[in-house]
Image (cartoon, helix red, strand yellow):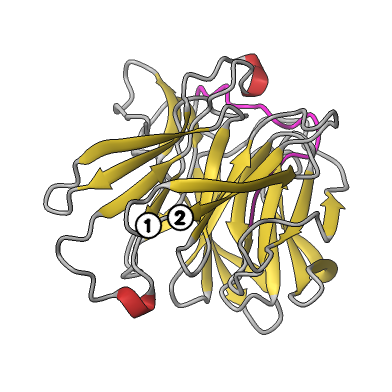
Amino acid sequence: MRLLLVFLTVAAALPTPAQQNRPSNRPLLAYVGTYSSPQGPEGSRGNGQGIYLFQIDPSNGNLSQREVIPNGSNPSCLALDPSKTHLYSANEISTFEGANSGSVSAYLIDRSTGHLTLLNTVSSQGAGPAHLSVHPSGKHVLVANYGGGTVAVLPIRPDGSLGPATDVKKDEGGVSRTPSATAPPGSFAFSGHDRPHAHMIQADPSGKFVLASDLGMDRIFIWKFDAEKGTLTAHDPASVSLPPGDGPRHFAFHPNARWLYSLQEESSTLVKFDYDAANGTLTPKQTISSLPSGFQGTDYTSEVMVSASGRSSIPPTACTTASPSSPSTRRAS
C-alpha cells in the first residue's frame, strides 16, 4: 500500500565529518519530499509542489520554510550522498520517457543556502520508485520500484549526475494471499499482496551486501554487491522470510552494524534480526508490536529509525483506524 500525503521523507543537510565544528550561525537545513503530480500513486492527486527546503531551529525543533524546488513527478523519497553535496529523489511515477517506469533525479546542493540545482533525471527501471539510498562508497544510487517489483543500481558520475542503470533485478517468487495472523484484532490491513512490491533498498554499513524488502512477497532479499561494476549477485541464502501477510516495509541497522530492525506495514510488528556482516545473513531473534497494548483496529506502519545512541528505535505510524475502546494513536505527518 502506498500511503499518500502522510509519510514524508526528510533528509537533513548535516555537516560532513570535516565540518563538525559548524559555525553557530550556519543554518541547519532539511529537505522534505512530497507527492506533487496531479496523478499521484494509486490514483490519488498529489498536493505538493516538489521538494521543500526548511530551516530547523535547533533550540526547539521548529521548521521555517525557505524554498520549494519545483518537481511535479512525486519526489517522495530523498537521499543525500556521503559528502552531503548532492541530493537524489525517487520520483514516484509510472511513466517516464514513454516507458513503464519511474525516475530518479540528481541535484547539486549549494552548501551556503541549501538551494538545489537539477543535474539530470534518469529511468528508475521500474514503475513507482518508493525508496532510494546512496551506497556508502558514494558511487551508486540504489532504488526500489514498488510498482514494478524491481530494484536497480544507478552509477553516480564524477559531477554527481546519474548514469543509466548498471544492474536491474526483478523480485521473483510467490506472494502471500492471506491477511497477517499477527495483526491487531479487528484489523483489515491487507494490501500490496497481489504481486511483488519492492519497498526499500539499502546497503549494509560495510557496503559488501545490499538488502531489499518486498512487501508483497514478505521477504527481505540479500545481494552481494560489486562496488566497481555496480552489480548485484544472488546471495545464499537469497532472502529471509517474514510471516505471511505481514508486509515488510522498511528496515534500519543499529549503529553497531550487528542488529537490523524490520518494520512490517500490515502487522505493525518490529522484528529484530542478528546480522552477520561477514556472511551477509539475518537471523530473527525477537518480534514485538509497535502499537500500544490492547490496541484494536487497523494500522499501517511507515518507517523505522534507530537513534544515534543506539538505545531507541522509532516506528512511526502512517495511518490508523482504531476501535472506540482501543488506546488512541496518532499518525505521522
Q: Is residue 195 above or below residue 239?
A: above
Residue 262 showing in the rendered view: no
> Contact, CB < 8 Å: mark 1 with mark 2?
yes
Q: Main secondary structure of the magenta part?
A: loop
Q: Is residue 178 left or right of residue 131?
A: right
| Front position in the image: 182 or 9 | 9
For mark 1, what is the residue? 13
As drawn, is 141 to the left or to the right of 30? right
In the rendered image, residue 210, in percent from the top left (x then y), is placed at 69, 66
Q: Which mark is residue 23?
A: none
Q: Position of residue 135 (x, y in %)?
A: 62, 67
Residue sitting at x 88%, y 46%: 173
Tag 2: amino acid: Ile
Asked where in the image residue 324 lies, by quadrant, the reply is: top left
Q: From the viewer's perspective, is residue 206 above or below residue 253?
A: below
Q: Which amino acid is tagged 1?
A: Ala
Q: Earlier in the sequence, mark 1 or mark 2?
A: 1
Q: Nearer the viewer, residue 224 or 184?
A: 224
Q: In front: 105, or 291?
A: 105
Circle 2 residue: 109
Disc 1 versus disc 2: nearer the observer: 2
Indicate the secondary structure of the residue bearing disc 1.
Answer: strand
Residue 20's x, y, as percent? Answer: 28, 75
